[in-house]
Image: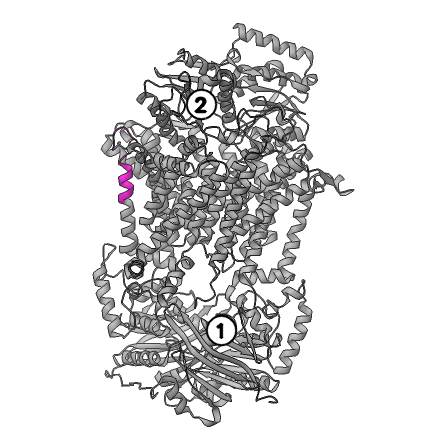
């Protein structure tokens, strides 16, 4: 068993699987991170992932273009990010409830649209091929990591790039500073002349955008097909990874990779002769996350003003 | 003072209400170029609301604002800054997790540049601090700074925005006498550089010493506007309170001659939230029938000391006893049970805003046999006892079922004091008991403390208001950087001496 | 007339109960109106659809019974969420706690033989309560002692417990014949008796109502309830006043888990009579919406649990009679929840302005 | 001040949504690569049936189906729904059908009671775990006929339909055993329950018979819808050397077949003919026979010949089958095809019996 677990083929497959699982989680979690750091908690991202997946899928089927697919997925995400922010910013709504509402709403909507557009047919439309991979010359020939890190589709590269970029954004760009200010002390940010509502709205829209992209990634890059259950908890995992990563991009990447690794491992454990009931191996990712959280991620409750509506004239 | 005649800002017939409370009623206010204009009034008189309107934080229900002769609508602080108006709030508008520079440039760079140019900002900031003598480390995080430093950051923030009009809301309430002098110095420099300053205060001496003109507000109405040189303290006080102000403190001696030690603190050492030592090796005691005042600038360990003594913060070293019982690191409930009362420094830490007065009054005693049986609360008893307390301590509220949030600051504080004193504590730890309350409430709270002392209670009074410490205490301890740097008896105390101790100049006593 | 209504709306008691109630009802109605547009959008008749919904949820004794059978777990799990959220403990794990309650109730119901119903039924329910309490205790003790974020722990425990149930159902507890992710049948001595013959209205429903009243009493009239509210509203003030935050949240979560566990236990021993894997169609998640739409008040939760139960119960009929496919029902459910999240601050303001002017 | 504006914004979003739906609804049903398969009716108006308004010449036979998942799940429920459609195709006006989908297990009893009360003649419960519900409802409505998919118990008015997939799976196993070159074959299933375990056992039997050296890797995802997991599991098997993958049912098969086609590894589908899901690699599928089976059962019920109190075992003789090879026929050598045909004949003639194994332990 040891040699099986150290073979080149195994390691390559394991790492590739880890990255496949982690990529959409990182995308969605980064978006939610921006939303939450501005003080809005959007629990509806699971739903936005669904609707984004459908929108991206349908668009690519109809237009034949991946770019349009991702774009429309993202735009639909923005729409629901906007609904969330209208509820949160304009109505001072209860964000946890609103998020759950968006989740259920999107569940219904994506199912409904799927039927309206494609019908209930035995012949299921599929995208001819998933997003092509782009090997990076030279680097992609390195054994093990070459195949997994440097022979990926464009979205994986962009995601890996997005982590330091967003980190930079929050550290060095004024908008990032503004988002943090609005999420930490909206009153002070308001007094400093920042438009709290506008910043929060934009952040929620950006979060929706990435959730939509992350959703569209599923049919376009991974499965080439759409079902109503395509997400199976991606949004929730993104929230877990976000808390795990203490609202920091690198932490999110780390959390997603650990979760991806545990996921990759569970299938490979089932393929060994270990006499474990399969449900126990299926628990592995969740158990690993739980244990990691207990031992390494204590405290930390996110931005101070998270999920708190900002009302200026309340004295 | 080149341009003293022109009108910088004119506010006409400003009316603003919050719910059913009328904060400002037909207020007229005029600020001239290059003047320091005092806005005087008690807490709740509408001073801050008026200036918040000018700064765009609130919208008036009616009335208009005229800046440089033009009618303006200031819909947000953003607009206010564009009009050259800056404001230093009493509660600083800062993001504690960010650095000084980031706080200063916050909200400025979003439109004209994308990447933060911290280097350029630092350069300008250092330049401005040099000109006005406002020294602050630009790279420190806000939470690492002292209150005085944080105030300087607020002023720098406004100056960085090149404001022409600067509003200072009760700027001296957190400063030592020496720091106050320094601040006044800075304000004069600002005016010399062509700024106009609105100085909000409720302290008459300050209004007299720094301002050029004074407008007095009472109950949301303008009572008078005077040139400072044409008026005097007595007249202003009369305008402000509507009656003669003289503290009628009933300082009667503790009748029982035999004093004994109630609180004993030995070598107490406590850490702050950030892990540094906030209280270092502190030893003192408080006797029955005695008020011991702890003076000092905010942030010198008083908060942590109080929290340690009330079980809210872990004690690192040393011990303390109440009536001979070692209560070091006991739970808040245990300490409470040993008849220790606690008036916390933040009203928010004492009252549950959305609870009724009954619930707030019962918060620290609902579990006693008097009010609950087998875990079930005796509503009737709670209600009647609360009604009694509210009457006895003269808390003004529509009924005992009113929500605490709806009370005025002074009445909230009276409610807290009532709750703590009515438990008949042996030791009362009172942190800033009169912070943010109007003169009437201040007077009655101080009298309640004195009455408690007369009955033989031991009181540990922590306050940054020197007059309060001086007028109430039998002994005064001065805290600086977590240590007790001096002890003075009532007889030998004076503001100058204590001020020096507070500022860190040690005396050899 | 209008004036009288306004006066009524502004009186003290009205302000506390009646007005929020009616605003909430209004908001929910609004969501249904908008949902009607969606139904119109897919080419069906919204009035017929809603008529079908109401008829199938409340049309006759049997349909009312069915609605209440579904409202029962939602009510109890909703109370569980209410307690936890009142103490500001973000328990997303009611689903897992409900499963755990179901599992233990099933264990008692299947393996404890020879007991008379009078002993067996309470024992099964107590086992359910215990299961939920244990599942609720794990995240809270981690939070209290190690400051571990409860959102993660409760979510992860959901997954783990549901997989554990699946393991039991296909392994140790599985039905010897069918073996299809379903346990053996509970012994009849552990079944909660049916209250109204010919329906599935069982005695667990009045029990749940009784418990609701107890929880309402607990929150408003007892020491623990007082402390829960104080900790939730202002933890620092509660601590200053000598209330132990850790102790309070630990008891809150034990109770919260127990309620969710009882929901699972009643569902197993009152309705399903077997432990089926995935036996809960997300009651624990929907309960969050139920609790918050009910404004975290036990009495409000009664209404909102019936509302959501009616939506579920009526969904099938709406689908058949009015041609509204199931996703539309989710869509309307989502709209109701989003609208209910809106706090009524601003909606009320036109009234107030008139009065003060 | 802002209230009306924000409210209008929210409301208009919803109205736009409604309009968008309106625009979508009448659109041509399937703009897919394979336009030949139009749904039989416009999907949105499917269940709208106003019963008493117009009397048809003779009273139609009324059939209701209760499904625990969505009818477009591409798998179990879609297969059941296709059976209903097939019946409509065959019997036209003579039957009136309705269905409810995504019904939760505890609700099934209520739904069946409703159907029975409304006078439906035949109620099909397409869920194996709704045991309590179907038993209670069937007992209380002795005059209504019930059919239960993959059940384990019958009643005087209840017939059980079982997907005896072991036979077709056995044939699929033979193909896999013959085609594998690495001697490693993978199978991805949802849950280890009888309806899947029969197929698993049959597949393994065929595999070992055709190739005693072959090793079978098995992954269960624990969930019928987890196509993400199914794809990962598939890839992990391919990485462990598998060169033929059998997706053993559940809409997760979409992920399994996707994974196989990505790595260009031959695959065998299940439940329905899944060739179109991954035309490049799917050599055949183990059809569970619901399409023909339900049509047959409804037909029998119409004539009053439903075998109540008995089991319909959908083996090769009753509708289950191994799908056509379609364009991948060339990938299966002729001798293998012949072998499969031979074994099929043996099974049909009764000379070869594949045991029904429902669980591993």
In the image, is residue A12 part of the stretch drawn in magenta?
Answer: no
**The C terminus of chain B, quarter of image:** bottom left
For label 2, the SS is: strand
Q: CA gap, disc 2 to disc 1?
A: 69 Å
**Residue nearest the observer in this picture, D317 or C140:** D317
Q: Quadrant location of residue B383? A: bottom left
- The image's colour scheme reads one colour
Q: Are marks 2 and 1 in contact (CB under 8 Å)?
A: no
- Parent chain of label 2: D
Q: Residue at x 38, y 57 (%)?
A: C232
Query: Are the residues under badges 2 and 1 in a single subunit?
Result: no
In this picture, which residue range is highlighted in magenta? Answer: C195-210
Give the residue at x 48% y 48%.
Answer: A99
Q: Is B192 located above or below residue D360 in the figure?
A: below
Location of residue B443 in the rendering, given as x and y in whole percent from the top left corner: 33, 81
Res. A65 image quadrant: top right
Q: Residue B483, how many percent across, how many down? A: 46, 77
Image quarter (top left, top right, bottom left or bottom right) of the N terminus of chain B: bottom right
Which residue is at the front of the view, B427 or A45?
A: A45
Tell me if residue C206 is in the magenta stretch: yes
| Numbered mark located on residue B53 in the image | 1
Q: Is residue B503 visible?
A: no
**Residue bearing the label numbered 2:** D97
Q: Secondary structure at mark 1?
A: helix
Spot occupied by residue B59 in the image (x, y as percentages of width and height): 48, 70
Q: Chain of mark 1?
A: B
């Amino acid at each position: 068993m040891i040699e099986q677990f150290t073979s080149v083929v195994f390691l390559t497959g394991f790492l590739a699987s880890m990255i496949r699982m982690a990529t959409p989680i990182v995308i969605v979690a980064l978006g939610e991170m921006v939303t939450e750091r501005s003080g809005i908690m959007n629990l509806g991202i699971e739903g936005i992932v669904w609707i984004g997946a459908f929108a991206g899928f349908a668009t690519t089927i109809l237009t034949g273009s991946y770019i349009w697919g991702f774009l429309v997925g993202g735009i639909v995400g923005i729409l629901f990010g906007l609904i969330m922010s209208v509820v949160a910013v304009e109505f001072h709504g209860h964000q946890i409830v609103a998020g759950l509402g968006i989740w259920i709403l999107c569940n219904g909507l994506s199912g409904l649209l799927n039927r309206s557009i494609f019908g209930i047919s035995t012949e299921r439309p599929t995208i001819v091929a998933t997003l092509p991979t782009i090997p990076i010359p030279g680097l992609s020939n390195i054994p093990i990591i070459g195949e997994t890190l440097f022979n990926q589709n464009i979205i994986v590269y962009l995601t890996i790039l997005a982590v330091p970029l967003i980190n930079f954004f929050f550290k060095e760009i004024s908008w990032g500073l503004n988002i943090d200010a609005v999420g930490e002390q909206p009153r002070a940010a308001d007094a400093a002349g920042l438009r709290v509502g506008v910043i929060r709205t934009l952040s929620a829209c950006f979060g929706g955008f990435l959730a939509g992209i992350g959703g569209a990634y599923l049919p376009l890059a991974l499965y080439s097909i759409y079902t109503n259950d395509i997400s199976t908890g991606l949004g929730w995992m993104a929230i877990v990874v976000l808390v795990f990563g203490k609202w920091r991009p690198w932490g999110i990447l780390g959390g997603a990779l650990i979760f991806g690794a545990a996921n990759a491992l569970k299938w490979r454990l089932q393929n060994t002769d270990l006499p474990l009931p399969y449900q126990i191996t299926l628990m592995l990712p969740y158990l690993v996350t739980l244990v990691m959280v207990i031992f390494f991620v204590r405290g930390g409750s996110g931005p101070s003003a998270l999920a708190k509506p900002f009302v200026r004239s309340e004295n | 003072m080149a341009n003293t005649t022109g009108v910088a800002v004119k506010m006409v017939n400003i009316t603003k209400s919050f719910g059913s409370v009328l904060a400002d009623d037909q207020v007229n206010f005029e600020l001239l170029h290059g003047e320091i204009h005092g806005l005087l009034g008690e807490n709740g008189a509408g001073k801050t609301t008026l200036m918040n309107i000018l700064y765009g934080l609130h919208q008036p229900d009616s009335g208009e604002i005229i800046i440089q002769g033009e009618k303006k609508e200031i819909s947000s602080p953003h607009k206010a800054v564009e009009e050259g108006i800056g404001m230093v709030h009493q509660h600083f508008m800062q993001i504690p997790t960010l650095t000084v520079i980031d706080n200063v440039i916050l909200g400025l760079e979003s439109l004209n540049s994308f990447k933060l140019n911290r280097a350029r900002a630092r350069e300008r900031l250092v330049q401005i601090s040099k000109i006005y003598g406002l020294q602050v480390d630009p790279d420190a995080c806000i939470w690492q700074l002292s209150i005085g430093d944080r105030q300087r950051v607020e002023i720098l923030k406004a100056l960085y925005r090149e404001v022409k009009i600067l509003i200072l809301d009760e700027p001296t309430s957190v400063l030592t006498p020496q720091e106050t002098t320094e601040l006044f110095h800075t304000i004069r420099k600002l005016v010399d550089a062509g700024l106009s300053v609105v100085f909000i205060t409720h302290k008459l001496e300050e209004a007299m010493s720094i301002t050029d003109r004074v407008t007095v507000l009472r109950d949301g109405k303008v009572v008078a506007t005077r040139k400072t040189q044409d008026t005097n303290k007595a007249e202003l006080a009369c305008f402000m309170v509507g009656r003669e102000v003289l503290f009628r403190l009933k300082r009667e001696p503790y009748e029982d001659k035999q004093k004994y030690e109630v609180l004993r603190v030995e070598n107490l050492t406590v850490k702050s939230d950030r892990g540094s030592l906030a209280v270092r090796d502190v030893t003192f005691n408080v006797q029955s029938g005695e008020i011991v005042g702890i003076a000092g600038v905010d942030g010198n360990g008083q908060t942590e000391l109080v929290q340690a003594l009330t079980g809210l913060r872990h004690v690192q070293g040393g011990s303390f006893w109440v009536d001979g019982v070692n209560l070091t690191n006991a739970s808040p409930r245990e300490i409470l049970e040993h008849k220790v009362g606690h008036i916390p420094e933040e009203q928010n830490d004492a009252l549950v805003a959305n609870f009724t007065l009954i619930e707030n009054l019962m918060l620290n005693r609902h579990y006693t046999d008097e009010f609950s049986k087998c875990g079930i609360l005796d509503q009737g008893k709670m209600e009647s006892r609360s009604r009694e307390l509210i009457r006895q301590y003269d808390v003004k509220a529509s009924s005992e079922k009113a929500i605490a949030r709806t009370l005025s600051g002074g009445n909230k504080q009276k409610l807290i004091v009532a709750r703590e004193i009515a438990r008949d504590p042996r030791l009362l730890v009172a942190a800033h008991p009169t912070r943010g309350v109007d003169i009437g409430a201040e007077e009655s709270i101080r009298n309640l403390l004195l009455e408690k002392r007369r009955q033989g209670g031991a009181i540990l009074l922590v306050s940054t208001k020197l007059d309060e410490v001086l007028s109430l205490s039998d002994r005064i301890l001065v805290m600086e950087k977590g240590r007790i740097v001096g002890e003075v008896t009532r007889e030998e105390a004076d503001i100058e001496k204590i001020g020096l101790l507070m500022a860190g100049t040690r005396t050899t006593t | 007339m209008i004036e009288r209504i306004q006066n009524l709306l502004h009186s003290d008691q009205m302000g506390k109960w009646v007005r929020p109630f009616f605003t909430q009802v209004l908001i929910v109605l609004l969501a249904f109106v908008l949902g009607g547009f969606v139904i119109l959008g897919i080419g069906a008749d919204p009035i017929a659809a809603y008529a079908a919904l109401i008829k199938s949820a409340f049309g006759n004794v049997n349909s009312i019974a069915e609605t209440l059978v579904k409202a029962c777990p939602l009510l109890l799990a909703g109370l569980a969420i209410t307690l936890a959220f009142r103490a500001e403990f973000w328990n997303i794990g009611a689903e897992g706690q409900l499963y755990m309650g179901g599992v233990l109730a099933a264990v008692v119901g299947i393996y404890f033989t020879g007991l008379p119903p009078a002993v067996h039924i309470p024992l099964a329910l107590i086992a359910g309560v215990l299961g939920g309490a244990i599942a609720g205790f794990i995240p809270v003790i981690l939070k209290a002692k190690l400051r571990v974020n409860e959102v993660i722990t409760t979510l992860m425990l959901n997954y783990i417990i549901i997989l554990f149930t699946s393991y039991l159902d296909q392994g140790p507890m599985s039905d010897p014949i069918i073996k299809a992710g379903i346990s053996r049948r509970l012994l009849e001595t552990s079944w909660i008796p049916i209250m109204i013959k010919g329906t599935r209205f069982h005695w667990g429903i009045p029990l749940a109502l009784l418990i609701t009243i107890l929880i309402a009493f607990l929150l408003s009239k007892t020491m623990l309830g007082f402390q829960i509210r104080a900790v939730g509203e202002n933890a620092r003030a509660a601590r200053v006043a000598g209330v132990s935050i850790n102790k309070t949240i630990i008891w809150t979560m034990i109770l919260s888990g127990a309620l969710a566990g009882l929901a699972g236990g009643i569902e197993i021993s009152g309705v399903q009579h077997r432990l089926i894997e995935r036996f809960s169609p997300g009651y624990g998640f929907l309960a969050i919406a139920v609790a918050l739409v009910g404004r975290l008040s036990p009495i409000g939760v009664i209404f909102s649990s019936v509302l959501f139960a009616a939506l579920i119960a009526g969904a099938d009929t709406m689908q058949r009679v009015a041609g509204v496919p199931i996703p539309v029902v989710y869509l309307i459910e989502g709209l109701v929840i989003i609208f209910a999240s809106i706090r009524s601050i601003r909606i009320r303001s036109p009234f107030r302005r008139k009065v003060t002017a | 001040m802002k209230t009306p504006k924000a409210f209008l914004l929210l409301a208009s979003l919803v109205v736009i949504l409604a309009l968008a739906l309106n625009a979508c609804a009448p659109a041509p049903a399937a703009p897919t690569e394979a336009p030949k398969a139009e749904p039989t009716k416009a999907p949105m108006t499917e269940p709208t049936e106003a019963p008493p308004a117009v009397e048809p010449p003779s009273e139609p036979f009324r059939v209701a189906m209760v499904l625990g998942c969505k009818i477009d799940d591409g798998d179990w429920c879609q297969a059941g729904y296709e059976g209903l459609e097939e019946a409509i195709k065959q019997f036209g006006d003579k039957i009136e059908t309705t269905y409810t989908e995504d019904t939760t297990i505890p609700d099934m009893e209520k739904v069946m009671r409703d159907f029975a009360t409304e006078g439906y003649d035949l109620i099909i419960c397409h869920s194996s775990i709704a045991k309590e519900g179907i038993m209670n409802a069937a007992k209380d409505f002795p005059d209504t006929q019930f059919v239960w998919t993959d059940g384990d118990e019958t009643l005087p008015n209840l017939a059980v339909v079982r997907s005896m997939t072991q036979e077709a799976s056995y044939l699929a196993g033979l193909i896999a055993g013959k085609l594998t070159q690495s001697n490693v074959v993978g199978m991805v299933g949802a849950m280890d329950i009888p309806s899947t375990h029969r197929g698993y056992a049959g597949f393994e039997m065929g595999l070992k018979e055709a190739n005693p050296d072959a090793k079978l890797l098995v992954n269960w995802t624990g969930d019928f819808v987890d196509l993400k997991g199914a794809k990962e599991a598939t890839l992990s098997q391919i990485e462990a050397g598998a060169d033929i993958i059998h997706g053993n049912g559940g809409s997760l098969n979409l992920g399994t077949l996707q994974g196989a086609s990505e790595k260009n590894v031959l695959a065998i589908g299940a439940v329905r003919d899944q060739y179109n899901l991954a035309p490049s690699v799917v050599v055949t599928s183990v059809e569970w026979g619901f399409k023909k089976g339900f049509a047959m059962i409804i037909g029998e019920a119409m004539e009053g010949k439903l075998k109540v109190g008995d089991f319909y075992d959908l083996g090769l003789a009753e509708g289950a089958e191994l799908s056509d090879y379609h364009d991948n026929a060339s990938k299966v050598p002729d001798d293998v095809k012949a072998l499969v045909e031979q074994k099929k004949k043996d099974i049909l003639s009764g000379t070869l019996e594949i045991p029904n194994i429902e669980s591993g332990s």
